[in-house]
Image (cartoon, grey):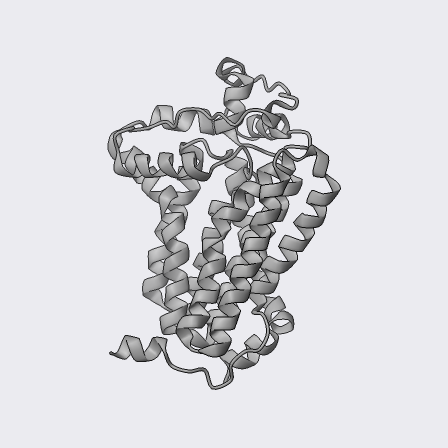
Amino acid sequence: MKVFKYLFEIEKKPLKGLLAAEWVVVIYGVVTTLLMLFLWTKIVSPVPMLWGRFHVLTSMAALWAVYRMVPCRLTMFCRVGLQLLMLSWWYPDTFDLNRILPNLDPWFASMEQRLFGCQPALLFSQQWSHPVFSELMYLGYSSYFFLVAIVTLYYFFQRYDEFLRSAYVILAAFFAYYVIFVLLPVTGPQYYYLAAGIDNIARGVFPSVGNYFMTHDEMLTMPGYQDGLFYQFIVSAHVAGERPTAAFPSSHVGITMVLLLLAWRSQSRRLLLTVLPFLLLMCLSTVYIRAHYAIDVIGGIVSGALFYTVLQYSWRFVGGTSHRHTSA
């Protein structure tokens, strides 16, 4: 009964306009739509992308209307939850847009070679192939999806006065990465190694692949213990939504870094100690499964901390009525 009462508690000062997090989605949608229109003849399937944006906006409007009729915590959570769920829909768009640009993987693979003297993504799983270690890596990588939910739910139930702020930080960080991925076409080892040839990669040769990814989206078979539960989970997730895109910086590492800092801000020791080990696993697992170069991990840590700092600071300017609501 306490949970039921909590969820349906009517807001004292209902918000009239869009949430800061919703404005992030609208702005990203408008900017990428204008880019689509400019590149219409070069995009493979522009019409479904356009209709998808329309559906996102209509769903947002529908939940806004429901909230206005019943302005309670549950309807507020549904508004935020919709945008979190739609992140997986927005993600493939980055590939549809960035594959028009020249692929940059040879430069990143060469930089990796100069920094480490090898390709960690090629060697890591070969040196550490034990089933238990493999499953631990895939557990770490799959935790990404659950950590977002855990931190969001913690703020909703335990720190509701900062719920909208945390939602804004998480969603804005995601879309900041999506903007980078649109402008920086790097596919990562699992795609580039296959296109360039494993023999070339092993010899430290990183050829240009031209417009290969305009017509190909095949990836290497994932390394490790293939009968593992978490291995199969990640394979299924990649088949459903992965594309040759979004390698640098690693958004998995970056978003997990944002979540760690949100956990630290919450002053909950339990939440912090829940997220921290998974950040460490994430840094290792992204290279282990060949989703990222090691420099992508470094970029993810730095960019995640930067995005968190900027977005927390910007809340005072973009929070608007949301800010007044949470402090009521």
Residue 151 against residue 298 in the figure, above or below = below
Question: Seen from this angle, which residue lies furthest right?
Answer: 38
Up the image or down, 278 lies above or below 6; here it is above
Q: Residue at x 62, y 42 (%)?
A: 47
Who is closer to the viewer here, 270 or 102? 102
Give whichever of 303, 195 is nearer the camera.
195
Quadrant in the picture for the N terminus = bottom left
Q: Nearer the viewer, residue 37 or 310?
A: 37
Residue 153, placed above or below residue 114? below
The image position of residue 212, as x and y in percent, is: 61, 22
Residue at 72% from the left image edge and 44% from the top image edge: 37
**Residue 220 appears left or right of 185:** left
Number of numbered labels in the structure image? 0
- Name the residue at 63% across, 54% down: 28
Location of residue 9 by image quarter: bottom left
Q: Position of residue 228 (x, y in %)?
A: 26, 34
Residue 210 x/y as whole percent: 66, 22
Q: Is residue 177 visible?
A: no
Q: Quadrant of residue 128?
A: top left
Q: Position of residue 217 (x, y in %)?
A: 52, 27
For image coordinates 68% across by 29% down, the residue present is 102
